[in-house]
Image: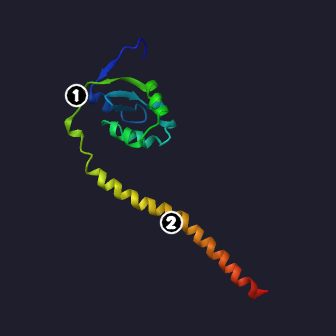
Amino acid sequence: MGGGVKKVYTYAEAAQHNGRQKCWIVIGGKVYDVTKFLEDHPGGDDVILSSTGKDATNDFEDVGHSSTARAMMDEFYIGDIDTATIPTKVKYTPPNQPHYNQDKTPQFIIKLLQLLVPLLILGAAVGIRFYTKPASA
């Protein structure tokens, strides 16, 4: 975009660009064309694609992006959202949060088991080898 002219998009316009060919996200009332960034996003393109068609501000903030990531956003900035066009029904996130926290506990346990199980198997193998060696000698 040349000349620094800000374009104002309606929420519906921004929401239409929700695929790999044209991918726009809305964060903090600003519109970003992240089509070229899909392949390079460290979290994968699915994360961005799941944030299209809605206000992605909470999604973006919840992840805790670095200052480098925030600085990179400037190159994808294409304009602002006409705040009068944002639907008020979009904010229904509270039911997700308790469910989301429950999901984290099993993930933690699975990761812990992924670490402990191989160590237990290794310990058992070393123990068996240690105790069976004198018997065969």
Q: Residue at x 33, y 18 (%)?
A: 7
Quadrant where the C terminus sits is bottom right
Q: Residue at x 46, y 24 (%)?
A: 75
Q: CA distance from mark 2 to mark 1?
A: 48 Å
Of callouts 2 and 1, the N-terminal one? 1
Q: Nearer the viewer, residue 88 or 132?
A: 132
Q: Label 1 near label 2: C-beta < 8 Å?
A: no
**Residue 16 image offset from top left, x and y in percent:** 32, 32
* Residue, disc 2: 113
Describe residue 130's horizontal placement relative to residue 72 as left or right: right
Describe residue 29's horizontal placement relative to residue 123 as left or right: left
| Neighbours of disc 2 within 10 Å: few (<14), some (14-19), many (20+) | few
Q: Residue at x 67, y 75 (%)?
A: 126
* Residue, disc 1: 85
> Among all residues in the image, which is located at the extreme top?
3
Which mark's residue is nearer the viewer, 2 or 1? 2
- Compared with 86, 97 (above or below) is below
Which picture quadrant has residue 85? top left
Q: Label 1's element?
A: helix
Work out whether residue 137 can be spotted: yes
Amino acid marked by disc 2: Leu
Amino acid marked by disc 1: Thr
- Compared with 74, 93 (above or below) is below
